[in-house]
Amino acid sequence: VPARITNISKDITVNEGSNVDLMCLAVGRPEANIIWNNLLEGEHLELTAVTKEESGSYECIASNDISSPDIRTVQVTVNYPPFISKARSTGTPVGQKGVLQCEASAVPRADFEWYKEDRRQVSPLSSVTPTGLELFVVKEDYGNYTCVAMNTMGMTNASIILYGKNKMLVNCVRNYCNLIFKWKAFTLCMLAAVQRKKKKSPTLCYAVLYLFISAIH
């Protein structure tokens, strides 16, 4: 008699940290052999203190070498609180569309709220999406924002800054000028050492070179 699964656990949803007992019963002659996910033998599969990484399909295979195995699956869904998977500040000029990026992983799916200086952001000029806060920027929008992700399991938050493009450009130019200055200082230092016919370059030259390399990284 070919192996046949007669009873198996239904799909289940549990909270992270719970214990899960999956059952799979089968008949056949010779007696059916039951194996889960091609790894563990037995009618019961126990998951202790289940984690979100253990979400997924669990396959029960019943066989006795008489015919093809009978295969059924159980879906295990694990609820867990949100954690921020991506958060990024951005620079946007006035009058342009800005996107403050904030994404979270969670089951059930996370809902988002945005705050600026403890005031919730609700405006016809802004919209909350699963990937962030979109808004048409005015000068008063610049500053620090808090992205709050929540579901029935808990909540978390991240701090994100909206700044002007001009500030970003000034910082970029300033950093570039600093690099040029440090490199010129090093080359002048080495040139002076050569002109003085010193066999070893002064320690000061290497100190300047170290500052240059540090600024790059």
Image (cartoon, grey):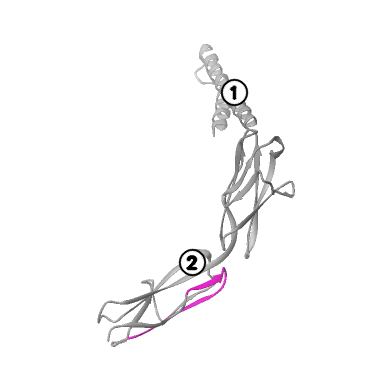
Q: Quadrant of residue 29?
A: bottom left
Q: Which residue is mark 1?
A: 177
Q: Check the image and name the residue furthest to the right.
A: 118
Judge the density around disc 2: few (<14), some (14-19), many (≥20) Cα neighbours within 10 Å: some
On screen, residue 47 versus residue 137, left or right, reads left
Amino acid type at circle 1 is Cys
Image coords of residue 69 (percent x, y): 30, 77
Residue 209 lies, with reference to residue 134, above or below; the image says above
Q: Is residue 14 magenta?
A: yes
Q: Please report the bounds of the magenta region as a residue range.
A: 11-27
Amino acid type at circle 2 is Ser
Image coords of residue 152 (percent x, y): 63, 65
Q: Residue at x 27, y 87 (%)?
A: 1
Q: Residue at x 56, y 27 (%)?
A: 212
On screen, residue 189 versus residue 35, left or right, reads right
Principal SS element in the magenta part? strand
Image coords of residue 124 (percent x, y): 67, 46
Nearer to us in this view, 122 or 120:
122
The quarter in which the C terminus is drawn is top right
Q: Quadrant of residue 145?
A: top right
The disc placed on residue 55 is 2
The disc placed on residue 64 is none
